[in-house]
Image: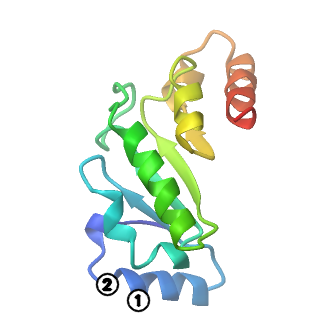
Amino acid sequence: MNIHQEACIHLHRTVAAIHDAGMKAAVTLNPSTPVETLRDIVGDLDMVLLMSVDPGFGGQKFITHTLEKIKRLRQLISENGSSATIEVDGGVTLDNAPSIAAAGADIVVAGNTVFASADPKDTISRLSKTISLQ
């Protein structure tokens, strides 16, 4: 279950309720929300989703400062002994996927890149290779 931190008043309580229901807990951060806001809870998370565009519609351009956020989040996860994975959603392309993976992302969401492709299967394969090579 994935929740937006910005919409959740009691994040610790909500994450605990998700785990109590037998699900994995993930938190999403909007582009302007610093990853440091997760310092006290990252150890309880299974995944963090970093939005790399403002939520709302597909086809937006990747917000480049997300690369630094990925690096900071990877460090925060390491410092806290967390096993949380990092997912990045928004503006992911075949061109920027290598740098997203190199920054520390485990998973990318590339909706527009895949669905606008002439060969979605090949595009997915190429994206998968990019991520798994890191």
Q: Quadrant of the C terminus?
A: top right
Tell me if residue 66 comes above or below residue 75 in the rendering: above
Q: Which residue is mark 2?
A: 10
Which residue sits at x=54%, y=32%?
Answer: 110
Q: Secondary structure at mark 2?
A: loop
Location of residue 86 in the rendering, given as x and y in whole percent from the top left corner:
55, 53
Tell me if residue 129 comes above or below residue 6 in the rendering: above
Tell me if residue 40 comes above or below residue 67 in the rendering: below
Total numbered labels placed on residues in the image: 2
Location of residue 40 in the rendering, given as x and y in whole percent from the top left corner:
39, 79
Tell me if residue 10 comes above or below residue 69 in the rendering: below
Location of residue 121 in the rendering, given as x and y in whole percent from the top left corner:
74, 22
Q: CA distance from mark 2 to mark 1?
A: 5 Å
Identify the amino acid type marked 2.
His
Location of residue 72 in the rendering, given as x and y in whole percent from the top left corner:
42, 52
Identify the amino acid type marked 1.
Arg
Query: Given the current orientation, which residue lies at the most extreme top position?
Result: 118
- Within 10 Å of disc 1 (Cα), the crowding (few <14, some 14-19, many 20+) is few
Which residue sits at x=71%, y=21%?
Answer: 126
Which residue sits at x=47%, y=63%?
Answer: 76
Q: Secondary structure at mark 1?
A: helix
Q: Say if mark 2 contacts mark 1, CB within 8 Å.
A: yes
Which residue sits at x=52%, y=73%?
Answer: 80
Question: Looking at the image, which is closer to me, 71 or 25?
Answer: 71
- Within 10 Å of disc 2 (Cα), the crowding (few <14, some 14-19, many 20+) is few
- The answer to whether 107 appears left or right of 7 in the picture is right
Q: Quadrant of residue 21?
A: bottom right
Question: Looking at the image, which is closer to me, 39 or 108?
Answer: 39
Q: Quadrant of the N terminus?
A: bottom right
Q: Which residue is mark 1?
A: 13
